[in-house]
Image: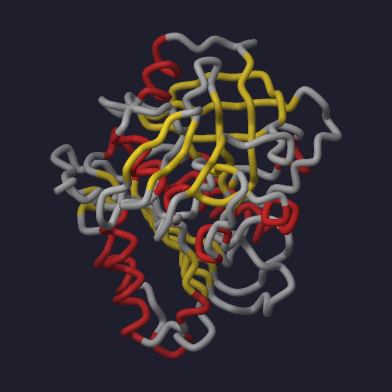
Amino acid sequence: MPQVAFNGQQYAVADGESVLDCLLRHEQAVPYSCKTGLCQSCLVQAVDCTAPAKASQGLKATLQASGHALACQWMPDGDVNVQLPGGAVSTTAAQITQLQLLNEVVMKLLVKPAARDASIECRPGQYMNLINPAGVIRSYSVANDYQRDGVLEFHIANTAQGLFTKWLFNEARVGDGVELRGPAGTCFYLPSTDQNEPLLLSALGTGLAPLYGILQDALTNGHRGPITLIHGSGKPELLYYQDELQALTQQYPNFSYHGIVLDNPRGISTCTQGDAEQETLARLDPSRLGDTRVYLCGNPGFVQRLRKQSFLKGVRSANIFCDAFVERAVPSPA
């Protein structure tokens, strides 16, 4: 049975476990978030051993060269020795500049890097790792253009079990410091491609954050094709940024916005009762499937179903953009 050496201790790896799963099972304090290799929160550095190629896939060349790997993707077939990241993994100090409730469960968080010229090359729609003063690290999508605004905007839902969100909603104050790592992710607008292509953006809840950034990026870059944004929620009160989105529909004739809710008992006119998934599929133009770009954000089931159905309807796989964060099942030790 392989062993993982970490902080001077040896831990046995159960069948089917990753390095991350093993360390978490032994109650070691290793940062992590998505467990699928997307967020890059669980970076470790190999010591006197070599990580498999899969465990370093997607990392910057500098990180790969210095022996860094993703613990969640490292399935050891022999003994390994790892440590938490060293100097090659850079973080950027930042400060909270705004905390604003957008509805009863969603907080708008603005953070400003300590140095304006900090080396953050972030596209709207990508995600960053945020690290709070207690060392809790989570990944959140960027809802604005940092290069233009000088701050990073995040929309964060208040989850019952979230350690980061408990701190954010109950303890965090303007002026508090956080650390940033990133960006990562491939869900962003491509201004170099055909600007006449239709864009279909669909989100649930705070999945609106990256799509709001992508939308503004597309409009700012003069996208000429039709742009449709669908934002779904359980009830009207949980939709947000409706005024801003409606204003954009008045400013840009090629943009349309649709707020979709499962339940609208009071008949509020700013949204439509229905199913966001079905509305999204209905908005696909059959005559333009070959060049339509689809952007999806929300809970994993929503993203996976729409990704599959969009592809089956004729949207090219390369034109479907999404960064789903899925918890991988951890096998029970024998």
Marker count (numbered): 0
Furthest-right residue in this view: 117
Q: Identify the residue at horizontal 51%, vertical 53% (top origin).
A: 211
Q: Identify the residue at horizontal 52%, vertical 49% (top origin).
A: 210
Q: Is residue 142 above or below residue 326?
A: above
Q: With 17 as the anchor, is 137 left or right in this view?
A: right
Q: Is residue 32 above or below residue 308?
A: above
Q: With 269 as the anchor, is 297 left or right in this view?
A: right
* Residue 57 x %, y %: 57, 63
Q: Identify the residue at horizontal 63%, vertical 56% (top origin).
A: 59
Q: Identify the residue at horizontal 47%, vertical 47% (top origin).
A: 71
* Residue 133 x %, y %: 55, 15
Residue 280 in sight here: yes
* Residue 178 x %, y %: 61, 21
In the image shown, does 186 or 289 lie closer to the viewer? 186
Q: Quadrant of residue 189?
A: bottom right
* Residue 325 x %, y %: 39, 51
Residue 246 in sight here: no
In the image shown, does 248 or 241 lie closer to the viewer? 241
Q: How is the image coloured?
A: secondary structure
Q: Is residue 57 above or below residue 310?
A: above
Q: With 16 as the anchor, is 128 left or right in this view?
A: right
In the image shown, does 21 or 268 lie closer to the viewer? 21
Q: Is residue 54 above or below residue 265?
A: below
Q: Quadrant of residue 11?
A: top left
